[in-house]
Amino acid sequence: KTKAKYIHLHTPDSNNCFAVLLRTTPNNDKGTAHILEHIVLCGSEKYPVRDPFFNMLKRSLNTYMNAWTGNDFTCYPFATQNEKDFKNLLDVYLQAVYKPLINHHDFLQEGWRYDFQKEGDANSDVLVKGIVYNEMKGVMQSPDNLFLETLQKNMYKDNPYHYCSGGLPSHIP
């Protein structure tokens, strides 16, 4: 129905691996796909608990679990050597990716929000906070990452690779 491509590779490796990859081509520097990558893992219709992804990290026999946003895709991969664990992780991942809850509270935590520097003190400075916002602030503090981002912006002026898929801190809000 979805016309999704499924590729199965049989290898002697004892890991059972799976990944959902989605095309997420940016059209600005706001990091929308990166924020959605985080929000998708905050609960689904079938698993409406807060952060089922992080709960599975503690309860699973996984050998690898992650999610990331690349220049033109978002990937949700996992691996485990246990067949039952594989089926459990597969269900959690597919539910998260295809039936996420996506609510405003999760956006404020994972994306960005305005907050007072001193909690509850309306006279203190207003700051931008959020997991993706802070993550990208850290990424952009690295001279290597800043150089590569600037190089990419200058090399690819007329296409989606011009934009920072993770989001530039100055553009995320």
Image (cartoon, rainbow, N blue to C red):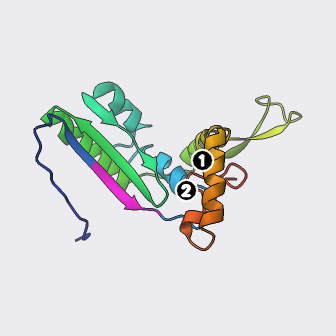
Density class for disc 1 (Cα within 10 Å; few <14, some 14-19, many ≥20) is many
Question: Residue 101, can we see it?
Answer: yes
Q: Is residue 1 left or right of residue 22?
A: left
Query: Which image quarter: residue 159?
Result: bottom right
Where is residue 89 shown, x and y percent of the image?
26, 40
Would you name the residue on which mark 1 appears? 111
Residue 63 or 110: which is nearer the viewer?
Answer: 63
> What kind of residue is marked 1?
Gly
Q: Is residue 99 magenta?
A: no
* Up/down of 97 relative to 63, above or below: below
**Residues under labels 2 and 1: Cα distance?**
14 Å
Describe the element under mark 1 as helix, strand or loop: loop
**The N terminus appears in which quarter of the rendering?**
bottom left
Q: From which residue to which does the magenta span run?
A: 19-24
Q: Please tell me whether the stretch drawn in magenta is mainly helix, strand or loop.
A: strand
Question: Residue 98, can we see it?
Answer: no
Contact check, label 2 and label 1, Cβ < 8 Å = no
Residue 151 or 71: which is nearer the viewer?
Answer: 151
Mark 2 or mark 1, whichever is nearer to me: 2
Q: Earlier in the sequence, mark 2 or mark 1?
A: 1
Q: Is residue 26 left or right of residue 154?
A: left
Residue 59 or 136: which is nearer the viewer?
Answer: 136
Which numbered disc covers residue 165?
2
